[in-house]
Amino acid sequence: MDIDLLLADGNGEPVLAKGLPYGVAAVSARAEEPEPEQFGLLDYRQDDKDPNDLVRQRWGVIVPAGTDGKRLAEAIAPLRAARKEEQNGKEPIVFEAPAGMSAEEAGIWWGTVYNSKDIEAVDRPRYLLILGDADQISWESQQRWASSAFVGRLAFANDAGYESYVHKILACERAARAGFKKPRAAFHTVKDGTAATSTGHRGLMSPTIDAAQVGLKKNDFPASAIVDLNEEGVASLDDFMRAVALHDPTLLFSISHGLGSTAETPKDEQRRMQGAMSFGRGVKLTAEDVANKPFLPGGAWFFFACFSAGTPSYSAYQHWLASLKTRG
């Protein structure tokens, strides 16, 4: 087995045509991982309560410090009002966080701001929604906080994006209360002939589908159906878009290359295109392609690819590259 990379360059070609031998991971240098207790991340809350009960778990928001954060908090005011109602009238706490924090700084923030003695333990939110992109609140912060809470992020280019998202979320919640419809679970691998997607399908996608089907038969997997889009003949981008336009609530798990960029790519183009879903041969699915079309209405997408969630400020592979350089 090789270690492959789900990353395509700006032309849609795999960055790593041939994977590295699996054994290289055992002998390569590893980045030092700080102990959580160094940064106040250990948590002694009880986990025996219903995780969906906001009266018990509470819900809050983390925004960038300053005027941008206040504006973003206001953009989701209807969502904050809805969550306030769900937690028996308790106003959701809005935390402010500085930009560019490292993992260490995020740990200190967690210990001093989130775990402030001024906040009663019962009021401290387990669900935390970050507002803003990674240049406003870093990925390192999100990764660190997610080890102790249920953390998500909304990042849009303008306030209208936040407002539209909130409208859709609240509409879906109202529809679910009126008549809950159990969602489908759909799975798709872009079979572009590359080693990385082939390995991903064989080692991750197929076992996941098998486990879901077993769980469904035992009534342990909460889906109405298991849908293997590859088995249903979905191959092209057009096939994929038709499959995700259905109005049945669906959780989609996909494996593909994520689009990277070339050295000549302008920064604004890189920001707009990086992480797009690659279908091979230069065919890609971008955020602009789905902005004004039905795409998993009432559903969610687990997009497994390089840069699919965003771009970190530094490479997780840097310590390996540095080690290789010193070895010549």
Image (spheres, rainbow, N blue to C red):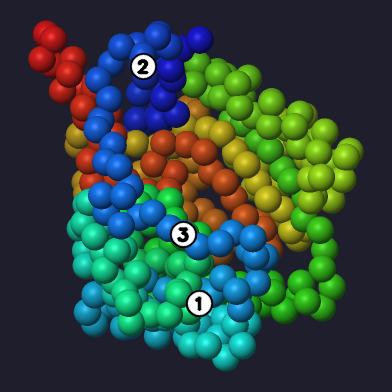
- Regarding mark 3 in the picture, which secondary structure is present there? loop
**Dot 2 surroundings within 10 Å: few (below 14), some, or many (20 or more)?**
few
Residue pointed to by mark 1: 122
Q: Earlier in the sequence, mark 3 or mark 2?
A: 2
**Above or below: residue 93 compared with residue 323:** below
- Regarding mark 1 in the picture, which secondary structure is present there? helix
Residue 115 in view in this figure:
yes
**Above or below: residue 327 compared with residue 152:** above
Type of amino acid under label 1:
Val
In the rendered structure, the answer to whether residue 113 lies left or right of residue 170 reads left
Residue pointed to by mark 2: 25
Q: Position of residue 316 (x, y in %)?
A: 29, 34
Q: Position of residue 254 (x, y in %)?
A: 60, 38
For the residues labelled 3 and 2, say whether their Cβ atoms are less than 8 Å apart: no
Rendering quarter of residue 94: bottom left
Residue pointed to by mark 3: 44
In the rendered structure, the answer to whether residue 228 lies left or right of residue 281 reads right
For the residues labelled 1 and 3, say whether their Cβ atoms are less than 8 Å apart: no
For the residues labelled 2 and 1, say whether their Cβ atoms are less than 8 Å apart: no
**Separation of residues labelled 3 and 2 (CA atoms):** 34 Å
Q: Position of residue 153 (x, y in %)?
A: 43, 62
